Image (cartoon, rainbow, N blue to C red):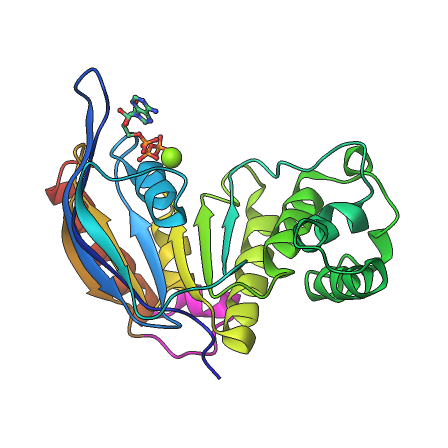
Amino acid sequence: MVRGVGLSLRGLGRAFPGGVRALEGVHFAVEPGEFVALLGPSGCGKSTLLRLVAGLDRPTAGELAWSEPPGDGALAYVFQDPHLLPWRSVLRNVALPLELRGVARREREATARAALAEVDLADWAGAYPTELSGGMRMRASLARALVTRPRLLLLDEPFAALDELTRLRLDERLRALWREQRPTVLFVTHSISEAVFLAERALVLSPRPARVVADVAVDLPPERDRRIRVTPAFGEHAARLFDLLEEHGA
Ligand SMILES: Nc1ncnc2c1ncn2[C@@H]1O[C@H](COP(=O)(O)OP(=O)(O)OP(=O)(O)O)[C@@H](O)[C@H]1O
Ligand SMILES: [Mg+2]
């Protein structure tokens, strides 16, 4: 079952006071339950775009429309930094979005434990963030995002700071969770291979002000594990995206 919500960005623009234009004429639609990767040069406006979609910032031009009202707690945002509260246990960090929504303690802890199990952190519920490795903290952050069963998951380079093996494992975990729960996902990354591995579709953005310069279907089997990365089809997709990024000045 697809639980994701669809959205449509119509000529979205964001100019900051002082004259920096981060986005201009950003136009694309995302189907409910689609997994879309966003690639683009550093500083082009990717985080600004996610913030607009999340409602953390407002566009100065254009509009954002939903396929249906996403509802309370339907959006989850994962930042590059895990942003865990050091004085709370892992369980209580993950349960926080439920606590803020007034879910009773017993229920929120049970739901948070289930979310921790989904990212293989069940045994670390009582630990504190400082006791975790970088990869474990990121998994806790992912569990906290998943705990409300979001209909739209926004991820801003979530695994960029991790070692390669940890990153490959988390890519696999995220892809599997997406297949199980089917939220709509917008995933910002600088890694072409991560985009090809995870997404059904990749959007290439221009240098600032960002707009969409290419929209590429990632036509690979739905069930993916790390071995797919060495197949010719994977390589062809990656090469295509590399060419597009080069062509558009990334
Ligand atoms: N609140 C703000 N006020 C003024 N300028 C801003 C603000 N937020 C972002 N910018 C500018 O907008 C541009 C786009 O920034 P943004 O963080 O969206 O880029 P990005 O594509 O996410 O970059 P990176 O790949 O390095 O994460 C940058 O030039 C940045 O300086
Ligand atoms: Mg950014």
Q: Residue at x 54, y 62 (%)?
A: 174
Report the residue that reaches farthest toward the front: 102
Q: Residue at x 30, y 71 (%)?
A: 31
Ligand 2 falls in which quarter? top left
* Image quadrant where residue 42 sits: top left
Q: Is residue 222 magenta?
A: yes
Give x and y (percent) for residue 65: 26, 60
Magenta range is: 220-231
* Image quadrant where residue 101 sits: bottom right
Height in image: 218 above or below 131?
A: below
Height in image: 42 above or below 38?
A: above
Report the residue that reaches farthest toward the bottom: 1
Seen in the image, is 59 located left or right of residue 124?
left
Q: Residue at x 22, y 63 (%)?
A: 29
Give x and y (percent) for residue 17: 23, 19
Q: How many marks?
A: 0
Residues 219 and 209: in front is: 209
Give x and y (percent) for residue 185: 42, 61
Q: Is residue 130 magenta?
A: no
